[in-house]
Image: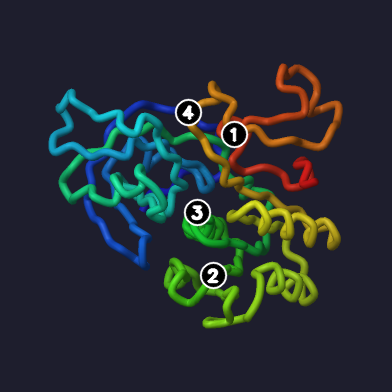
């Protein structure tokens, strides 16, 4: 199994195609696709994403790629190995409904790998991973990459209900929280994080999920003086820093303001999606 260097410099995005090797509905309205593309699989880092045209074609050489809907969709990497990688997505609108109709053997048009991954080298002994909803899949890749570095990790998984719990079989150490109490702790995944930090402080906390969850995680970690990186789930119309559709306000500082026409705003597709939680203006 080949895993890219966790904190290696990004090798640059590429426009490419990937063949659908497998497709599975892992939960209601949630689909996992296994895609064949060695260029992405061998260079992607935990926390990075791909930008996919949500239409499949029977042959890679087909020139009639559809652009309806026009915009690509951004998906974090669930895992990567050898010449293939996986994505997991929830069907929400026209684009994801179209992508869910892709069949094994068909081809997808995509850009990747994109963005900055997690700074895994900051964790030398232990880490806590926090994921909510479709923010859980990238934590699978993160947990495996940490394990290969000899770092112990604990996964705290949040979901609306038991039916929405994703990827639980991918983690060796796992706690679950559900909003309705149908599985695990009845409440927010932040409750599990507060309890875990009372027992032992890890080197790092890595988190991905809805903005309110990430804000709560950032505040909890700040109160305990624990380093935290969050992967922001922003809408990314272009994925390459052109459209400015994914800007997020950062805390004012000389480092943030210097040498950037965007002032204290950052384009998450370029400067993220993984960011130091202390840099973000959560107000």
The residue at which mark 4 appears reads as 238
Q: Earlier in the sequence, mark 3 or mark 2?
A: 3
Q: What is the CA distance from the residue labelled 2 to the residue labelled 1? A: 25 Å
Specify the quadrant of the image occupied by residue 173: bottom right
Comparing labels 3 and 2, the label whose residue is closer to the camera? 2
Q: What is the CA distance from the residue labelled 1 to the residue labelled 4? A: 9 Å
Relative to residue 24, is residue 19 depicted above or below? Answer: above
Could you tell me which secondary element the residue under label 3 belongs to?
Answer: helix
**Residue at image x 77%, y 46%?**
282
Q: Earlier in the sequence, mark 1 or mark 4?
A: 4
The residue at which mark 3 appears reads as 138
**Residue at image x 28%, y 45%?**
98
Comparing labels 3 and 4, the label whose residue is closer to the camera? 4
Q: Earlier in the sequence, mark 4 or mark 2?
A: 2
Could you tell me which secondary element the residue under label 4 belongs to?
Answer: loop
Q: Which mark is residue 38?
A: none
């Amino acid at each position: 199994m080949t895993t890219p260097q966790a904190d290696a410099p990004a090798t640059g995005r590429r426009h490419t195609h990937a063949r659908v090797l497998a497709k599975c509905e892992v939960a209601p309205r949630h689909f996992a696709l296994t895609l064949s593309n060695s260029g992405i699989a061998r260079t992607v880092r935990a926390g990075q994403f791909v930008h996919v045209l949500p239409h499949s074609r029977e042959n890679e050489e087909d020139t009639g790629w559809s652009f309806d809907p026009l915009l690509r969709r951004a998906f974090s990497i669930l895992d990567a190995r050898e010449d293939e990688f996986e994505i997991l997505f929830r069907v929400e609108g026209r684009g994801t409904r179209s992508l869910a109709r892709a069949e094994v053997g068909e081809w997808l048009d995509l850009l990747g790998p994109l963005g900055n991954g997690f700074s895994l080298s900051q964790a030398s002994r232990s880490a806590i991973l926090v994921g909510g909803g479709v923010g859980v899949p990238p934590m699978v890749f993160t947990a495996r990459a940490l394990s290969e570095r000899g770092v112990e990790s604990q996964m705290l998984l949040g979901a609306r209900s038991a039916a929405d719990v994703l990827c639980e079989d991918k983690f060796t150490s796992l706690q679950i929280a559900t909003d309705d109490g149908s599985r695990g702790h009845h409440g927010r995944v932040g409750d599990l994080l507060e309890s875990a930090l009372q027992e032992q402080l890890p080197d790092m906390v890595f988190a991905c999920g809805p903005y309110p969850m990430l804000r709560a995680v950032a505040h909890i970690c700040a109160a305990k003086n624990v380093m935290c990186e969050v992967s922001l789930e922003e809408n990314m119309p272009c994925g390459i820093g052109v459209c400015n559709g994914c800007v997020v306000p950062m805390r004012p500082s000389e480092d943030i303001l210097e040498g950037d026409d965007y002032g204290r705003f950052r384009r998450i597709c370029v400067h993220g999606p993984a960011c130091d939680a202390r840099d973000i203006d959560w107000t």
